[in-house]
Image (cartoon, coloured by chain):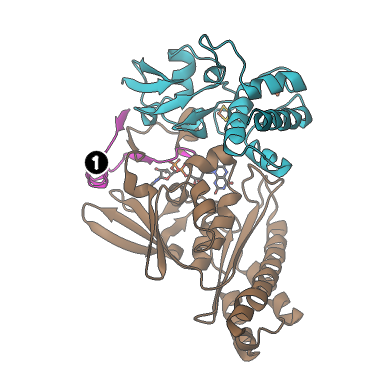
Chain colours: A cyan, B brown
């Protein structure tokens, strides 16, 4: 089947999509957007986190056909500037705080953290832990990730 | 495989009547796992995401009519006062990403004994609104679960909503797992006080082939509260009554040993949760609600 959707603000079309296919597969294999990672395919790790009509979800658990006509934001859509080369607040904070080691969990964490900081400009540590509780990282031990989100929130506050 | 995409509830019912083997997909948090892991290859997927009615809730008299697909995130945020037991349970489901998609209709469809919405639905008193082109029927929650991952839906039926009594007293939910996020319950317990009818209701998860009520424990406690005049006085519960309630709750279990825990542990944990949730709810009744009413 054919699926039409908007990804990072651009209308996209995927053809020959199998009916049981996930949105994650469509993004990675059909639309050339491999930023969202595929690790568990069962909703446990969060490395495939994208926003579907604004809401953070596991792309591996959304059927491709369910995304028809919807708006998806992936990690590729976070960077700003005309050519997408300017890191977003959260991306910059992750690099500055050393929150990235192997980087496999990073795209999902960035999408989740970005949504948190936009929704709640002054998150408590409990808010941060809750917002990131669906994202696993096997490298960092999470402390640097928490630092990064605190940094991003503080900078967002400064920027007004 | 075919992907059916009804745009309205009537179309969904017609599609299910025409293709009774079609697998409904709402949040997909159960269905997609099965497809991704090749455990299921349905001939038809019936997408429910486009049916706005399923994403709405309303209060009708003493009940909340909760659309089958209202995601857990919204239950937590919007229904804390009306359905406190279910809202607490919703908060323990999976992770934010899961709660943003998954809802009670899918939990009932999957009918896993470990589903977290079942204990509070049993405790609050809920009826499943099952519909087909033949009409609508209301199935009490205790009759809905018919076996491990089996429910009372006919092949042509879909869940339109769940009708849940609005809380008339304190409710609690407790769940045992290895950590806070992303945990399938080792076992779970929910308790609702119903001061209006002077009854108590319970729900137990993951400790029998289906979610169950602990009826002997409910009857014992209701009698003990009545005899002691406790509803009027709000006096503290005698520890012996709380202990007996906990024993009877554990007695309602018929658990198994599995990777998540042994049967013996589950019985013990249910007794502990029964005692604790009773303490919490009774304290809330004494402190908040009754006190406020007397003042
Ligand atoms: C990582 C992860 C963590 C999880 N953690 C928990 C947890 O902590 N607690 C818990 O209880 N569950 C948990 N689950 C399981 C799942 O999220 C729940 O069972 C959820 O309620 C399913 O809702 P859904 O809308 O996603 O269902 P779907 O996957 O869309 O459907 C589930 C079943 O219900 C049927 N169905 C859906 N809607 C209807 C309807 N309207 N009428 C008839 N049948 C219908 C489907 O055909 C399917 O059989 C978890 C799942 C994942 C992937
Ligand atoms: S790949 Fe989707 S949650 Fe792990
Ligand atoms: S940096 Fe390696 S998994 Fe998180």
Q: Position of residue B145 (x, y in %)?
A: 45, 58
Picture quarter containing residue B250?
A: bottom right
Residue B61 vs residue B81: left or right?
left
Q: Is residue B262 left or right of residue B144?
A: right
Whether B236 is drawn above or below A146: the answer is below
Where are the magenta residues, as a range?
B1-30
Pointer 1 local density, CA inside 10 Å: few below 14, some 14–19, many at least 20: many
Q: Nearer the viewer, residue B40 or B28?
A: B28
Which chain does tag 1 point to?
B
Residue B17 is one of the magenta-drawn residues = yes
Residue at image point 31% right, 20% down: A2
Q: Position of residue B165 (x, y in %)?
A: 45, 68
Which quarter of the rendered picture does the C terminus of chain A lie within? top right
How many labels were placed on the picture? 1
State yes or no: Cβ of the residue under disc 1 lies below 8 Å from any atom of ligand 1.
no
**Magenta span contains residue A108:** no
Q: Position of residue B46 (x, y in %)?
A: 32, 37
Q: Residue at x 35, y 16 (%)?
A: A13
Task: Look at the image and tell me whether residue A42 can be seen.
Answer: yes
Residue B97 vs residue A4: left or right? right
Point 50% across, 28% down: residue: A59
Residue B210 can be seen, yes or no: no
Q: Which residue bears the numbered disc 1?
A: B15
* Relative to A52, residue B154 above or below: below
Going 69% across and 63% down the picture, which residue do you hit? B273
Residue B64 in the image: state x and y as whole percent: 41, 62
Q: Check the picture and name the quadrant holding the N terminus of chain A.
A: top left
The kind of secondary structure element at disc 1 is helix
Q: Quadrant of ligand 3?
A: top right
């Amino acid at each position: 089947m054919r699926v039409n959707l908007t990804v990072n603000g651009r209308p996209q079309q995927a053809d020959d999509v199998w009916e049981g296919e996930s949105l994650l597969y469509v993004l990675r294999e059909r639309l050339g957007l491999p930023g969202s990672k595929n690790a568990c395919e069962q909703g446990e790790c969060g490395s495939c986190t994208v926003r579907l009509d604004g809401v953070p979800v596991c792309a591996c658990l959304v059927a491709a056909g369910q995304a028809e006509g919807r708006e998806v934001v992936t990690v590729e859509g976070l960077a700003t500037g005309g050519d997408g080369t300017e890191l977003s607040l959260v991306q910059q904070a992750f690099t500055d705080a050393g929150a990235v080691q192997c980087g496999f969990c990073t795209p999902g964490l960035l999408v989740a953290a970005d949504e948190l900081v936009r929704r709640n400009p002054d998150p408590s540590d409990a808010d941060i832990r809750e917002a990131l509780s669906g994202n696993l990282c096997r490298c960092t031990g999470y402390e640097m990730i928490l630092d990064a989100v605190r940094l991003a929130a503080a900078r967002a506050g400064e920027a007004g | 495989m075919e992907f059916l995409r009804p745009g309205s509830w009537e179309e969904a019912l017609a599609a299910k009547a025409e293709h009774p083997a079609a697998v409904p997909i709402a949040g997909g948090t159960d269905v997609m796992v099965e497809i991704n892991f090749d455990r299921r290859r349905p001939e038809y997927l019936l997408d429910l995401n486009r049916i706005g009615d399923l994403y709405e809730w309303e209060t009708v008299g003493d009940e909340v009519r909760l659309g089958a697909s209202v995601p857990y995130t919204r239950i937590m945020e919007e229904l804390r006062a009306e359905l406190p037991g279910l809202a607490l349970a919703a908060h323990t489901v999976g992770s934010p990403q899961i709660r943003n998609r998954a809802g009670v209709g899918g939990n009932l469809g999957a009918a896993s004994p470990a589903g977290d919405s079942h204990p509070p639905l049993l405790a609050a008193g809920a009826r499943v609104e099952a519909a087909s082109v033949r009409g609508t029927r209301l199935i009490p929650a205790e009759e809905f679960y018919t076996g491990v991952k089996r429910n009372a839906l006919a092949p042509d039926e879909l869940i339109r909503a769940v009708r849940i009594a609005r809380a008339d007293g304190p409710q609690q939910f407790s769940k045992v797992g290895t950590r806070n996020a992303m945990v399938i319950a080792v076992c779970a317990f929910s308790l609702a006080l119903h001061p209006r009818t002077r009854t108590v209701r319970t729900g137990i998860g993951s400790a029998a082939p289906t979610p169950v009520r602990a009826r002997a424990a409910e009857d014992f406690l209701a009698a003990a509260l009545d005899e002691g005049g406790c509803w009027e006085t709000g006096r503290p519960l005698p520890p012996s009554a709380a202990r007996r309630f906990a024993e009877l709750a554990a007695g309602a279990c018929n658990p198994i040993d599995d990777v998540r825990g042994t049967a013996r542990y589950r019985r013990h944990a249910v007794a502990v949760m029964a005692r604790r949730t009773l303490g919490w709810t009774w304290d809330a009744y004494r402190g908040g609600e009754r006190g406020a009413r007397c003042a």
